[in-house]
Image: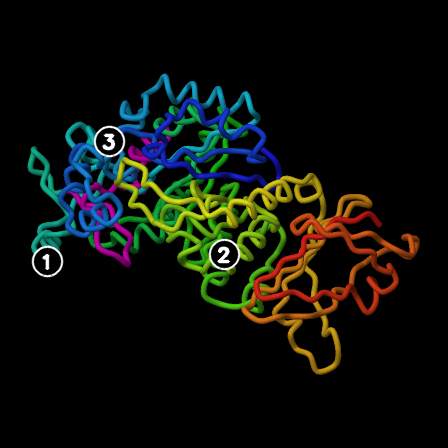
């Protein structure tokens, strides 16, 4: 996988043509890997909950007025077994999918849910000690926190400490050596199916986070000397050295997870700033150490977030796409994002939703993705630039984001006006003195070509003027 890989998420349940043909479908697209979300066996009990939940039923009806129970697959994050679900073709289809992807140079990423399993997972009866069992006091005070097994054990539902429990799940005790050993075995089995895992809510399994969440249900004693993720990643890498670990992570714990061994961690901070803040807040985030940035997952859309064109607005979403597609780190895209789909679909729905493709959005991504795949943006050196005023008294340069990729004498300059007003500025560039006096700039996104004086590009800097949410991606030789 390349240094700054392009990854696309597909929901296994929404692939009407089947998962086996994904490789052929994506051939030549510029992607490095596919995250096939929701491939594991769904929970029958979880599916029943997904069918009966009133808020989900309302959403199903909004998307598919004639929906039926057969359309509901259940949550991909209530795993009944780490075995490819028969609904999507089972083991044979997943093996063919991986082979087809590999044939076209793509890797396969799948889910790993470390914090919990489905409430009807076989371990709840065979190995109940692998889970958190609630005390009598907790059962009385918070009956919604757990459920009773057939054997009368009161096990906790999986949860994030800031939200209500996920009632289709059961909480694993990740501090337990026995649980860790069992989850390592599961991951080693998964590593036989795929090239990496996207780890759901990875920060919940950090020792201190887990102990804080479940402090009243844990027996007294010290925390383990090693983190869950240290044990898991080390064990898998011993047998599969190139296996990729991606963390869904929040709460400013991304750097810590990277230090523990994750190859990439979600960059939700960038997402939030692109969606809700302005260019200066985005730029401040990009001042972080390059080692952190290169392990960040850049996105403006995924199955948890609303569709970008709906959340950002169309023009802003395209500017944001140019940002995430040209930064260091993993460049992450979502099924339907490149078509401009606007409907957020619940993960429990096992049927795709018909939407109309937006030709402007589709054409934009058709130009953007090859740029994101350019060798300079993978093998080159990245530098964040500071725009300066185009003329005295003009503060519009503050709305410009700019960075430079350089590989030998090949340069790619990205300039984004991340605002709803026109903006001008100067971009001082480290063009060498020996460069030709005139340099030809090719805008790879817009298709235009400009000739500029190399001395002016050094100082006072390349002059740019962009409309609201406008983008230049210049390629040139110096």
Q: What is the CA distance from the residue labelled 1 to the residue labelled 2? A: 45 Å
Question: Which residue in the protein does label 3 denote?
Answer: 80
Which mark is first along the chain, 3 or 2? 3
Badge 3: how crowded within 10 Å, few (<14), some, or many (20+)? many
Picture residue at 31% right of the left edge, 50% below the top:
210
Q: Which mark is residue 317?
A: 2
Q: Disc 3 versus disc 1: distance between alpha carbons?
A: 29 Å
For residue 177: magenta? yes
Residues 134 and 465: in front is 465
Other residues around mark 1 within 10 Å, as few (<14) / some (14–19) / many (≥20): few
Residue 7 percent coordinates (x, y) = 51, 39
Q: Which residue is mark 1?
A: 141
Dot 2: what SS?
A: helix
Residue 219 visible at all: no
Residue 164 in picture, x, y percent from top left? 22, 55
Boundaries of the magenta span: 155-184
Residue 29 shows up from this direction: yes
Q: Secondary structure at mark 3?
A: strand
Q: Can you tell which of label 3 and label 1 is closer to the viewer?
A: 3
Mark 1 near mark 2, Cβ–Cβ under 8 Å? no
> Which image quarter: residue 77?
top left
Give the image location of residue 277, x and y in percent: 49, 67
Whole-Å distance between the Cαs marked 2 and 3? 36 Å
Q: Say which quadrant the N terminus sits in.
A: top right
In this rendered view, identify the residue nearer to me: 187 or 477: 477
Residue at 41 percent across and 36 percent down: it is 10
Task: Using residue 440 as the reference point, say whether residue 91 is left or right of it.
Answer: left
Pointer 2 with pointer 3, Cβ within 8 A? no
Residue 449 image position (x, y, % from top left): 76, 52
The answer to which of 222 and 182 lies nearer the viewer is: 182
């Amino acid at each position: 996988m390349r240094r700054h890989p392009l990854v696309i998420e597909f929901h296994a349940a929404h692939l009407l043509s089947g998962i086996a043909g994904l490789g052929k479908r994506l051939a030549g697209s510029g992607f490095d890997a596919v995250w096939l979300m929701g491939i594991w066996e769904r929970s029958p009990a979880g599916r029943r909950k997904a069918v009966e939940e009133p808020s989900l039923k309302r959403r199903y009806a909004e998307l598919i007025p004639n929906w039926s129970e057969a359309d509901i697959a259940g949550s991909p994050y209530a795993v009944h077994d780490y075995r490819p679900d028969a609904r999507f073709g089972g083991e044979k289809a997943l093996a063919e999918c991986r082979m087809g992807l590999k044939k076209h140079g793509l890797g396969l990423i799948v889910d790993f849910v470390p914090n919990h399993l489905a409430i009807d997972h076989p371990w709840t009866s065979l190995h109940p000690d692998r889970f958190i069992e609630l005390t009598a006091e907790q059962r009385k005070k918070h009956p919604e926190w757990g459920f009773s097994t057939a054997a009368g054990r009161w096990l906790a539902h999986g949860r994030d400490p800031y939200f209500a429990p996920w009632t289709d799940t059961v909480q694993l005790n990740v501090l337990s050596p026995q649980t860790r050993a069992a989850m390592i075995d599961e991951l080693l089995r998964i590593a036989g199916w795929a090239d990496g895992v996207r780890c759901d809510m990875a920060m919940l399994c950090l020792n201190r986070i887990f102990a804080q969440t479940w402090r009243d249900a844990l027996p007294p004693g010290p925390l383990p000397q090693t983190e869950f993720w240290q044990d898991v990643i080390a064990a898998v890498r011993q047998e599969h050295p190139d296996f990729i670990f991606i963390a869904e992570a929040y709460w400013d714990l991304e750097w810590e997870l990277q230090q523990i061994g994750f190859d990439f961690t979600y960059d939700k901070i960038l997402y939030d700033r692109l969606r809700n803040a302005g260019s200066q807040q985005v730029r401040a985030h990009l001042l972080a150490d390059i080692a952190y940035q290169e392990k960040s997952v850049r996105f403006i859309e995924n199955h948890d977030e609303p569709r970008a064109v709906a959340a950002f607005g169309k023009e802003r979403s395209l500017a944001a796409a140019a940002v995430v597609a040209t930064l260091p780190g993993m460049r992450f895209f979502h099924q339907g994002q490149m078509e401009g789909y606007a409907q957020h679909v619940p993960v429990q729905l096992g049927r795709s939703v018909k939407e109309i493709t937006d030709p402007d959005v589709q054409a934009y991504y058709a130009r953007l993705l090859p740029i994101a795949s350019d060798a300079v943006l993978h093998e080159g050196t990245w530098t964040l630039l500071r725009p300066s005023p185009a003329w005295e008294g003009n503060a519009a340069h503050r709305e410009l984001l700019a960075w430079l990729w350089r590989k030998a004498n090949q340069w790619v300059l990205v300039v984004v006006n991340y605002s709803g007003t026109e903006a001008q500025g100067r971009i001082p560039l480290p063009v060498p003195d020996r460069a030709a006096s005139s340099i030809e700039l090719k805008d790879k996104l817009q298709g235009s070509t400009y000739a500029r004086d190399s001395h002016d590009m050094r100082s006072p800097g390349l002059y740019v003027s962009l409309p609201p949410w406008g983008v230049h991606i210049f390629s040139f030789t110096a």
